[in-house]
Amino acid sequence: MFGNVLVGVRTLQWAALCLGLLAITAQTASAADCRGHPGALGTSRTLVVDPRQHPRIGTMQYAETLPLGDHEVVLTFDDGPLPRNSNQVLDILASQCVKATFFIIGRMAQSAPEGVRKLRDAGHSIGTHTQNHPTGMKRMSIERARQEIDDGIASVKTALGDDAALAPFFRIPGLSRADGVEDYLASQGIQIWSADFPADDWHHISSSRVYDIAIKRLEAKGRGILLLHDIQARTVAALPRILRELNARGYRIVHVVPATPEQPATPTEPQQWQLHPPSENVAISHWPKIPNFVFANAEMLPGPALSDLDWRDGRSMSLVEASNHASRPARRVPLPREAPWPRQSSLAPGSAANILPVPAQSIFEIQERPGAATQELATPSHHAEQPVPTEPKTDGLAKLISVDASDSPDTIAVPIGAR
Ligand SMILES: [Zn+2]
């Protein structure tokens, strides 16, 4: 009996060793298979996800993100294709045998359909990013938002000529999330991709600054979804150095694809979808959700009525009464002697105001710093839409796009609660 158990344990150890070797082999093979590019970064593994099980990802806004291991990175590119820059991004990724996810704008796909097909032919994942990249989906009617989403999907499908090549992945322009938009996308089985960190490559900053921000934010989290823009020349300039540095620092690229009947989702545990899984020892994980208040549009806030403070039908209770109430013997346990405090006069019920003035909004306004990106403190997305920089190099169509904007480089994103 003992011998059988020992054999069983040894078999398990051998199986685990083989699996470990297989994992290492698979990882090194992907980089080694990058023909003509010895030492390339490569793509370490493919992660298959089920959008219906995890409809919203990215800790910049949501409680869940992709189930990545330490030093695993997912690259994402928005707003293309703009052939002049997007083709260079494709070449750079190919030179490192790296697979990424692209979020395509419908109008860009109409303008450069061959650019969308190049993404597919190179094996990248393709999601959508609305038809016109509208600013502020959170302020838009749900009918118009749905139209933007649906038209964008239709345009990219037309460019591909193959519905199956489009992943049910979607990124909201400017990360301008809204409940109605999220609900609609979930109902369609489409996964919303926020991100774990941007590199601010839509700002008028140098390519070396893009590189610095990308590496700094990645190092701060150790893993995650990086948000970039393939339409930006500064991103093209920064990308080779970013990939080389990822390789040098031991990061591994993960390619994400949607689950299909033929390719089921990669098995994962729920806690793997949280960048910082809540610990039983951390009190914050047990905090209740913040309630929704209904006074947002009220001119006056309701004041507390005296009845709110009393447990006996609005009748006020003096301190002595309270003391008498508390001193009723319970199970013969001796209570402390009545405190010799002065008698308190009861509040007159009519003296409490029924309404309180609403504080002026100007109290909460923050002085804007010239040249600095401001953070939308009042909104969960903390993202601001900004017009595309009117660079001389940017095409006319790209000028119309509002790029995905973010907060200032050093602020920490605060995820909203899981919905
Ligand atoms: Zn965008």
Image (spheres, rainbow, N blue to C red):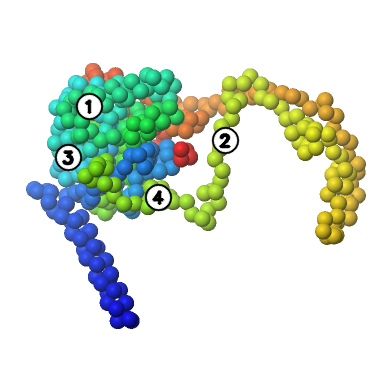
Q: Disc 2 residue type? A: Pro
- The foreground one among 217 and 97 is 97
Mark 3 packing: few (<14 Cα in 10 Å), some, or many (20+)? some
| Three-letter code, disc 1 | Val
**Label 1 to label 4: alpha-carbon separation:** 32 Å
What's the CA distance linking mark 4 and mark 3?
28 Å
Label 3 sits on residue: 123
Q: Amino acid at mark 3?
A: Gly
Question: Counting residues from the N terminus, which is met first, the one under dot 1 or under dot 4?
Answer: 1
Which residue is at a point 31% across and 37% down the rendered structure image?
Answer: 227
User: Could you say where residue 360 lies in the image, as x and y percent from the top left?
Assistant: 62, 22
For label 4, the residue is: 270
Which label's residue is closer to the chain start, 2 or 1?
A: 1
Q: Is residue 275 left or right of residue 20?
A: right
Q: What label does residue 78 carry, if any?
A: none
Q: Quadrant of residue 143?
A: top left
Where residue 272 sits: x, y (%)? Answer: 38, 51
In primary-sequence order, the first of circles 2 and 4 is 4
Q: Point out which mark residue 291 bears.
A: 2
Let me know if residue 235 appears in the view: no
Pick whichever of labels 4 and 3 is earlier in the sequence. Answer: 3
Q: Could you tell me which secondary element the residue under label 4 belongs to?
A: helix
Give the camera-side residue of 288 and 267. Answer: 267
